[in-house]
Amino acid sequence: MEKVTVTVTNPVGLHARPASLLTKLVKGFECDIEFYKNGDATKKHQPKSILSVMALGAVKGDELTFEANGKDEKEAIKAIEEFVKSGCGE
């Protein structure tokens, strides 16, 4: 399993457009991916579902932890980390 924690830097958080871009990005990987915010691992979300990403309600300053498990987990975590650090496509 690979894991990374990143901070949302996008001024408006993961609203519809960046949530859609994140979902599109992670759907390209075969591994299982889950994520949660601010260290609360009891409320994990599925980034391959736009509704799940939107339900998370991530705003600027929130810490998101992504966990990937499977064939291409390293590549997935690297791509997710770069996506969030670059401002989520905004």
Image: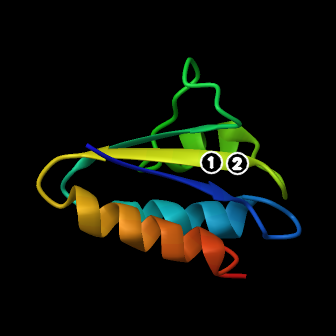
Residue type at tag 1: Leu
25 left or right, relative to 55 = left
60 left or right, relative to 43 = right
Q: Quadrant of the N terminus?
A: top left
Circle 2 — which element? strand
Circle 1 — which element? strand
Residue 10: percent from the left, percent from the top?
79, 70
Residue 81 makes an appearance in the image: yes
For the point 71% across and 36% down, which residue is it?
A: 38
Q: Which residue is mark 2?
A: 63
Q: Are marks 2 and 1 in contact (CB under 8 Å)?
A: yes
3 left or right, relative to 30 = right
Q: Which residue is mark 1?
A: 64
Residue type at tag 2: Glu
Farthest residue to the left: give it.
71
Mark 2 neighbour density, 10 Å: few (under 14) some (14–19) many (20 or more): some
For the point 52% across and 34% down, which residue is it?
A: 45
Farthest residue to the right: give it.
11
Separation of marks 2 and 1 at Cα, in angstroms:
4 Å
Residue 83: percent from the left, percent from the top?
54, 74
